Image (cartoon, rainbow, N blue to C red):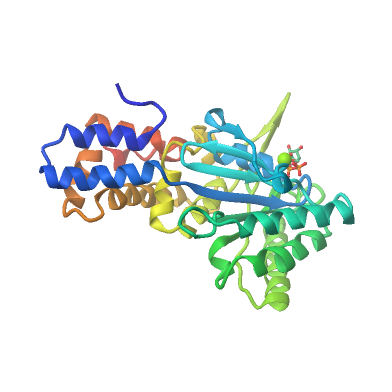
């Protein structure tokens, strides 16, 4: 029986039963073993109510998340969710007063300073959620400029994503959103583009660092009303493309939301395809590293019509839905 939770265990069983040479098998097994025990850590931060929790819930399959506790008493109110190899750190929101904010800023700095067992920074990526509906971005900008960028090492832009949420309510008034098509009206789109530019410039001016924020909506649902996310597949693609390949593969291990409708509405059509391909490549490249069987392994993990196509499709969550061409069904 396959272990339902772990893609790498499932791949191990396939390789074990394959016709690969003993040498190739043992290299792949070692790689899969290493992957099984590695972690990807993402810190999510931003102002109170910006939509940090909503974004986590929309992106990931939180039904499998295990809630953990930080053993460091100074950062223990940063919520920790573990989804297989992915660990999400959901920080308390800023903007509830100077004293509270200072405490939270210290905790974030402390978390960014933690090293993993190999001496690398524990936090692989920081995702800043910005409330697109607020005029006052002061708290968020000072968090980025004074706390995040100075504590993210020599190339901070490589580990930093800035995402403007609540695009649907950013512009006020009747032209805020095209609810029928679940996309910005032309006016909202102009407004959001200007917001992106202004944020980029304020960060560049203060720190010299160039970031490229995107806007999206995590969506919402309450009795009688529901709105699908917008540009969520774009956000996931941005996350995936920022990660080095050995970390990227960890997101492919059954962490992504299974809800296909979360991924359907975006400013371009190909984010799902690009993300699936990128995760697929990462699975094959990381499993076959050091063995000269990359293409055979690709075949084994996904040749059309084989059960394993479904297996990988399932591991990638709702993002892989509608991508039958890649998985062979
Ligand atoms: N209209 C709209 N509302 C949203 C969106 N994302 C989140 N919300 C709403 O904004 C409110 C705050 O969202 P949360 O996800 O709780 O925000 P948070 O950043 O986790 O807040 P704290 O944990 O309190 O700091 C909730 O009522 C959400 O339903 C969005 O894209 N559009
Ligand atoms: Mg929250």
Query: Front-most of 242 and 212?
Result: 242
Farthest top residue in view:
1
Residue at 32% across / 42% down in the picture?
Answer: 33
Q: Position of residue 68 (x, y in %)?
A: 61, 35
Q: Is residue 175 left or right of residue 156?
A: right
Specify the quadrant of the image occupied by residue 72. top right
Residue at 29% across / 21% down in the picture?
Answer: 1
Residue at 83% across / 58% down in the picture?
Answer: 135
Query: Front-most of 266 and 162?
Result: 162
Q: Position of residue 34 (x, y in %)?
A: 35, 46
- Can residue 264 be seen at all in this image of the molecule? no
Query: Front-most of 38 and 186?
Result: 38
Q: Position of residue 119 (x, y in %)?
A: 49, 60
Indicate whether 165 appears above or below 223.
Answer: below
Q: Which quadrant does ligand 1 occupy?
A: top right
- Can residue 158 be seen at all in this image of the molecule? yes
Say how many tags the image has.
0
Residue at 12% across / 41% down in the picture?
Answer: 20
Indicate whether 317 appears above or below 242.
Answer: above
Q: Is residue 286 left or right of residue 117?
A: left
Q: Position of residue 189 (x, y in %)?
A: 67, 58
The quadrant of the rendering that contains the C terminus is top left
């Amino acid at each position: 029986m396959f272990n339902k939770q772990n893609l790498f265990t499932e791949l191990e069983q396939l390789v074990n039963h394959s016709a690969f040479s003993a040498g190739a098998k043992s290299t792949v097994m070692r790689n899969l073993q290493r992957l099984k025990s590695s972690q990807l850590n993402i810190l999510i931060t931003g102002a109170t109510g910006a939509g940090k929790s909503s974004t986590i819930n929309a992106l990931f399959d939180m039904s499998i998340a295990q809630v953990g506790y930080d053993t460091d008493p100074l950062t223990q109110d940063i919520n920790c969710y573990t989804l297989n190899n992915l660990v999400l750190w959901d920080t308390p929101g800023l903007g509830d007063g100077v004293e509270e904010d200072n405490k939270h800023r210290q905790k974030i700095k402390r978390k960014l300073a933690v090293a993993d067992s190999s001496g690398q920074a524990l936090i692989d990526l920081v995702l800043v959620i910005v409330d697109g509906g607020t005029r006052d971005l002061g708290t968020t900008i000072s968090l980025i400029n004074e706390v995040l960028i100075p504590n993210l090492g020599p190339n901070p832009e490589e580990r930093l994503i800035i995402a403007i949420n609540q695009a649907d309510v950013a512009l006020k008034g009747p032209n805020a959103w095209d609810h029928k098509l679940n996309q910005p009206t032309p006016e909202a789109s102009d407004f959001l583009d200007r917001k992106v530019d202004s944020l980029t410039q304020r960060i560049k001016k203060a720190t010299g660092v160039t970031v490229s924020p995107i806007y999206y909506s995590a969506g919402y649902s309450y009795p009688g009303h529901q709105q699908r996310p917008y540009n969520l597949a774009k956000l996931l693609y941005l996350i995936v493309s920022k990660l080095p390949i050995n970390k990227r593969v960890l997101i492919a291990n059954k962490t992504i939301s299974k809800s296909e409708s979360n991924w359907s509405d975006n400013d371009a059509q190909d984010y799902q395809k690009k993300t699936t391909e990128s995760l697929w490549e990462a699975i094959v490249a990381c499993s076959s590293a050091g063995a000269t069987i990359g293409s055979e392994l690709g075949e084994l993990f996904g040749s059309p019509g084989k059960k394993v196509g479904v297996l990988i499709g399932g591991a990638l969550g709702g993002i892989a839905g509608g991508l039958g061409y890649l998985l062979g069904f």
